[in-house]
DNA sequence: TCCTAAGTGGAGAGATTTGCTCCGTTTACA
DNA sequence: TGTAAACGGAGCAAATCTCTCCACTTAGGA
């Protein structure tokens, strides 16, 4: 793959991620192309179908989640408590809630493409480890399941209406704080 | 106003509320008319502009919020703690988060119609009373503001993707429980 | 029961949006 | 420097949406 093609591909994924977060998964291809600064044909060449594009977004996102875990792996041993809240904060900052719901919107497990199911399983696996460690350190109630924790994080990081963002800019942080507090034993 | 016209008006508001919750505020008028079981012309006669319709939804919704408070006013004196969680549960069941964000989506305080601002103020007033009482009874931390509490409730009651609803049907209840726990002193 | 003003439905014209392809031009890199 | 790879965007067909017009129906008072 030529270097310029690779760069455009990444620009498309970034733009698509933003737009999907803002306007949902059915955001028109021409808007995505415009935001990415590429022609519409280039978008279609890289991602012939909408599913291809959504998978690209999801896979890119999982990479960033993994990076969060790695970044705090070292601190965990010395200070689990602050590593835990740092991880939760960083995960929240990725705005899972803006991206994931859009990716599965209106579909059941059955009609998700197999590749999407693999991504899903991988994501759950990543979170499972870190949650188990938090529970082992007494930072989270034992009866919290990975699924609940993860979806909860997603719900809290859904984009807020602009009206709210301007009036209560700390809303997302506040929610995460209340959430972690509510999860404590 | 003729009785049948009144009935249709209410059917329209109900249908519009559902659809706005499901698909956002720009849901096409013809879909709303179809779900309400009325002709498109009837919809336009009752609500000439989209803003008229959204205001109708908002005002209807405030009425239901008020009903929740009234329903628990009696219990409050005898058992504040369970009245409080019952109110929070019932408010959550109204799915504020499905309706309100759509009503203000993409608008700043300035370009909301005056009537919408009045509704907003009224809603905040309703919640302020009940939150103050909860705080007076030591059920909620003193440093929680009405706005944070209310928006938080909204965020937690946003509709979940169907995939989540079928896999984790108790998700909304679980979130409210964690939320209330996180708000305790 | 009858009359009329109020209310209704839905076809459809016109405007807008969107998906997707085709092809002449540009560019990376061997 | 030559060529295969990559690009952009005009533009057509199809789908969607808004909003009006007008002939028909009905509630409810006399």
Image (cartoon, coloured by chain):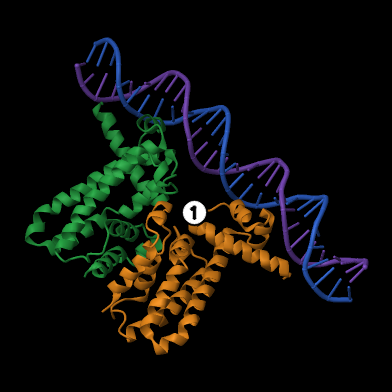
Chain colours: A green, B orange, C purple, D blue
Q: Is residue B164 left or right of residue A123?
A: right
Q: Residue at x 41, y 38 (%)?
A: A50
Residue at 29% across, 73% down = B181
Residue A35, horizontal then vertical, whole percent: 37, 42
At a point 68% along the width and 54% down the height, the residue shown is B39
Q: Residues within 10 Å of mark 1 (few under 14, many from 20)?
A: few
| Image location (x, y in percent) of residue A51 | 39, 38
Residue A56 image point, x, y percent: 32, 39
| Residue at the extreme front | A143
Residue A36 shows in this picture: no
**Residue in the foreground of this view, choosing between A160 and B85:** B85
Q: Residue furthest bottom?
A: B77
Q: Which residue is mark 1?
A: B23
Choose top left, top right, bottom left or bottom right for residue A59: top left
Q: Is residue A39 above or below residue B28?
A: above
Q: SS of the residue at dot 1? A: helix
Q: What residue is drawn where x is 40% and y is 74%?
A: B88
Quarter of the image with the C terminus of chain B is: bottom left
Horizontal and vertical percent position of residue A123: 26, 48
State left or right for residue A122 relative to residue A133: right
User: How many numbered discs sit on the rendered protein?
Assistant: 1
The answer to which image quadrant residue B144 occupies is bottom left
Q: Chain of mark 1?
A: B
With D4 as the anchor, is C8 left or right in this view? right
Identify the image quadrant of the N terminus of chain B: bottom right
Compared with A85, A48 (above or below) is above
Nearer-the-camera pick, A12 or B9: B9
| Image-quadrant location for residue B139 | bottom left
Q: Is residue B24 left or right of residue A166?
A: right
Specify whether residue A91 is in view: yes
């Amino acid at each position: 793959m030529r270097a310029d093609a690779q760069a455009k591909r990444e620009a498309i994924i970034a733009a698509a991620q933003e737009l999907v977060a803002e306007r949902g998964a059915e955001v028109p291809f021409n808007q995505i192309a415009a935001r990415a600064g590429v022609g519409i044909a280039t978008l279609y060449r890289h991602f012939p179908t909408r599913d291809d594009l959504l998978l690209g977004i999801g896979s890119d996102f999982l990479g960033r989640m993994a990076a969060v875990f790695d970044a705090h792996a070292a601190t965990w041993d010395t200070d689990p408590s602050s590593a835990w809240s740092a991880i939760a904060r960083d995960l929240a900052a990725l705005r899972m809630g803006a991206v994931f719901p859009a990716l599965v919107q209106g579909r059941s497990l059955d009609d998700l493409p197999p590749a999407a199911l693999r991504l899903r399983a991988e994501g759950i696996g990543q979170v499972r480890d870190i949650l188990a460690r938090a529970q082992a350190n007494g930072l989270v109630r034992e009866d919290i399941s990975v699924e609940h924790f993860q979806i909860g994080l997603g719900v809290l990081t859904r984009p807020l209406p602009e009206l709210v963002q301007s009036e209560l800019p700390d809303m997302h942080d506040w929610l995460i704080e209340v959430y972690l507090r509510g999860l404590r034993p």
